[in-house]
Structures are given as C-alpha cells and as structure tokens.
Image (tube, rainbow, N blue to C red):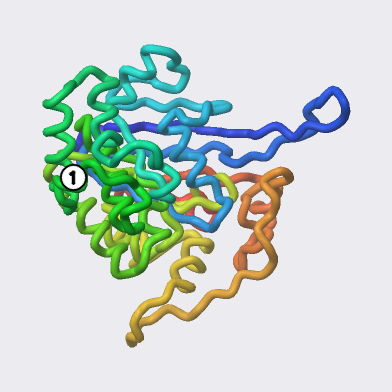
Amino acid sequence: MSQNLLEVTDLQKHFPITAGFFKRQVGAVKAVDGVSFYLKAGETLGIVGESGCGKSTTGRMVMRIIQPTRGKIVFDGQDISRLRGRALRDIRRKFQMVFQDPYASLNPKMSVGETIAEPLIVNQVLKGRQATERAVQLLETVGLRGGDFNRYPHEFSGGQRQRIGIARAVALNPKLIVADEAVSALDVSIQSQILNLLMDLKSDFNLSYLFISHNLAVVRHISDRVGVMYLGHMVEIGPKHSLYGEPLHPYTQALISAAPEPKRVNRRARIILQGDVPSPANPPKGCPFHTRCPRVMDECKVERPVLQEVRPDHFVACHLHR
C-alpha cells in the first residue's frame, strides 16, 4: 500500500457572509481552512472531531459536491480540484459516497432495484436485463434478498436502507468511498452490522475509505489511520494505535479522555476543556485551539502551528512538539 490514492493539500472552503441590499461580502465562514492529508490505496482513513469542525465539508469537497475555495485534490494521480462537466462525470465513477441519512439519500419514487441499477445504466456500464441482474446480485451482497428489488425505501428499516445506499455506492466498482457519518443515525446493534459489512466489502471490492464520524470508538474499529479536526484545521493525524495509545495534541488528548470506555487500570483522567468553540466566522489568531488549551503558551496566540511529523507517519500541529 505504498501508492497514495488521494492527496489533499491546503484545502479550504470559505462560505461568504453578505449584508445589505446589494449583498456585499462582509466576511466569511471558514468551514475548512487549510487541511492536508493523504490516503493510501486499500486504506481506511478516519476523520473525527466535534460538530462543526469541518469534517463533512472536507468529505464533500473530496467528492466535488462542494467546490473548494482553494487547495488541491489529487485522486488516482489526477488533479480533480477544478474539473467540470464531462471530465468530472467520468472520474466520479471512481469515487462514491455513503450519506448519513439513508432515507433522504434514496429516491422514494424509485424501487430499490431501480436505485441500484441507475448508476449502471446512466454510466452505460450495463443496461436492461444485465443491469437488473447486477442490482439483484448487489442486494444479496449487502445482506438483503434479491426479491426486494421491487420494494420501495419506506418499506425498509434504517439499517436496511443504509445497506441499499452501500449497494448503490459499490455498483460501479469505485476505488474510494467517502462515508459521512454512515452509521450515526442507526441503533448500536445495527451499527456493528454495517461496519462489518463495510469491512467485508473493502476486501471484496478492493476499496479505500474516507470514514467521517464523531464517534471515536467507531473510527478506531474501522480505521487504519485517524485524523483529528478542530475548527476547520487538521490538528493531528497518524496510525490509530499511535494516536489512541499516546495522543500528542492537547485537543486529541481531551477528546479521547471524554470517550466512554470499559473500566480499566490505565484509564486516562478526564480532561475538561473550558470555554466554547470559537466561531468559524471569526476564528482566533495563532493556533485555533489556544482559547481552550490547558497548556497554552504565548507563541500559540500569535503563530499558527503547522503539521509536522514527530513520529513515524504521525503528524501534529502543536508548538509543544517541535
């Protein structure tokens, strides 16, 4: 797994704030403000962080659902940051998305079989009876019955709908799947089933995952490496055993200490952060975390730290580690 399937460099998304009759821009919400990471072929990279940290916006920019304000996205050796029209449609066959709400992502007027067969027909991969047979096969692959082909989304449970969404995502044999909070709307018992399904499909279809979630336990279970975001910035990224075993950034330490875990002797003391997350419309100067950091220094208030490798393949953006 030496080749990088995805490389993201200095990715930014600033949503304009307008005011007045002429809607002049008076500011910007910096939802994502300079995120960089890579994803190796056959790997699962988890991205975690509090609500509003920019992780979902990052995933949607990678999918090119949202146009980046700035930055570079290289997928499978091709810069897709500014692709449009047919060129973008052609390469989109190689990356697909599984959404948070399985019901909202399915067309209620189409049967589930039609939903799964649609990308095959639209992209002229298969048509007619062949597309139908492939859709039936995919339904069975994700744990449903081929006889469900003519049923509609409202006839299924939440977990079953997510299986349908996953079947649609793998229909074109993509190289990358972006899973945005793919199990957060499901019951805990169903979550484990969907996670196991994703892991099975990863090997069966030779997939790579960008797995976005606020649930640290879920991300730890499915990921090879984990990135931690705060206020539109990537503050730490590394192998999951290194990051969970000995987190380096004060925010990561606080996040992991707050996660529920079975009682054990070496359980970390809970770190309580003071204050609220600053507004992305008016982020603090210097380190974005310095207003809540228990180990803040003077330089943190004026100079923004950059991601740097402090252990093998383990990067952190913090003045404490230089």
**In which quadrant of the rendered view does residue 48 lie?**
bottom left
Residue located at (41% from left, 27% from top)? 73
Tell me: residue 304, above or below residue 61: below
> How far from the left and from the top, in percent, is residue 45?
32, 47
Tell me: residue 175, above or below residue 126: below
**In which quadrant of the rendered view does residue 174 lie?**
top left
Residue located at (73% from left, 45% from top)? 282
Question: On the picture, is 145 further left or further right than 39?
Answer: left
Residue 237 visible in the snapshot: no
Q: How many numbered discs, if any?
A: 1
Task: Please state which of residues 222 and 243 is positioned toward the viewer in this rendering.
Answer: 222
Question: On the picture, is 96 further left or further right than 25?
Answer: left
Tell me: residue 207, above or below residue 65: below
Residue located at (78% from left, 28% from top)? 25
Q: Amino acid at mark 1?
A: Leu
> How far from the left and from the top, in percent, is residue 130?
12, 26
> How far from the left and from the top, in percent, is residue 310?
39, 51
Q: Quarter holding the N terminus?
A: top left
Q: Which residue is mark 1?
A: 139
Task: Please state which of residues 298 and 261 is positioned toward the viewer in this rendering.
Answer: 261
Crowd class of label 1 (few under 14; some 14 to 19; many from 20; radius 10 Å): many
Residue 31 visible in the snapshot: yes
Residue located at (48% from left, 39% from top)? 58
> How far from the left and from the top, in percent, is residue 26?
80, 32
